[in-house]
Amino acid sequence: MIGRFYIKEVSWSTHEAALRQIREQVFIVEQHVAEDLEWDAYDADADHLLAIDHQAQPIACARIVDGSIGRMAVIKDWRCSGVGKALLGQAIKVCQERSYKNITLSAQTHAIQFYENAGFVVSSKPYLDANIWHVDMQLNI
């Protein structure tokens, strides 16, 4: 438990409902990402992280596919509480445990500073993905 929440590694087969709940709220409802862009074939085999509060409610998630961190989402009431930083730290740790030397992610441009604070550097020009501006970022470990 990290303060008021904890993070655990989960699979899509056992925690699909909780992972979907978070991603639907953040990406589909708040950010208006089309459902057909949100759900893909990577979920079934990816490594997933799930943050849960002290009342056993899902509050944040992230997905790791071949050393790339993605689908990182924190529900609105938990933003700026440290859960995102802890989740990213755990995702980096999982990548290190799986011997990835170059960790990548696609960051929404408003979150560049957040990822830079964890050591990531921008590695592309801005581009539109799901009608949201992103940049590629990487962390060499």
Image: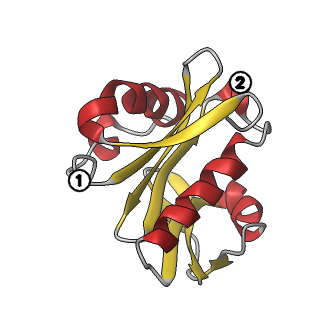
Q: Is residue 141 above or below residue 50?
A: below
Figure label count:
2
Image height check: is 110 above or below 35?
Answer: below
Q: Judge depth for marks 1 and 2 and give the one in front.
A: 1
Residue type at mark 1 is Asp
Provide the secondary structure element on which disc 1 rests.
Answer: loop
Q: Quadrant of residue 108?
A: bottom right
Which of the image's four quarters has the C terminus? bottom right
Compare residues 96 and 40 and report the one nearer the observer: 96
Q: Which residue is mark 2?
A: 77
Spot occupied by residue 7 in the image (x, y as percentages of width and height): 57, 40
Q: Position of residue 17 (x, y in %)?
A: 34, 24
Q: Residues within 10 Å of mark 1 (few under 14, many from 20)?
A: few
Q: Which residue is mark 1?
A: 45
Is the Cβ of the residue at disc 1 closer than 8 Å to that at disc 2?
A: no
Residue 98, given in percent of the width and then of the height, sits at 40, 72
Q: Specify the quadrant that holds the N terminus.
A: top right
**Mark 1 vs mark 2: which is more N-terminal?**
1
Q: CA distance from mark 1 to mark 2?
A: 29 Å
Q: Is residue 3 above or below residue 48?
A: above
The residue lying at 30 percent from left, 54 percent from top is 46
Identify which residue is drawn at 63% across, 24% down. 53
> Above or below — where is 71 with respect to 54?
below
Q: Quadrant location of residue 80?
A: top right
Residue at the farthest front position: 1
Which amino acid type is marked by label 2? Asp
Residue ID at (78%, 67%): 117
Residue at 40 percent of width and 47 percent of height: 48
Q: Nearer the viewer, residue 65 or 130?
A: 65
Which residue is the extreme one toward the top?
Answer: 55
Q: Position of residue 45 (x, y in %)?
A: 23, 53
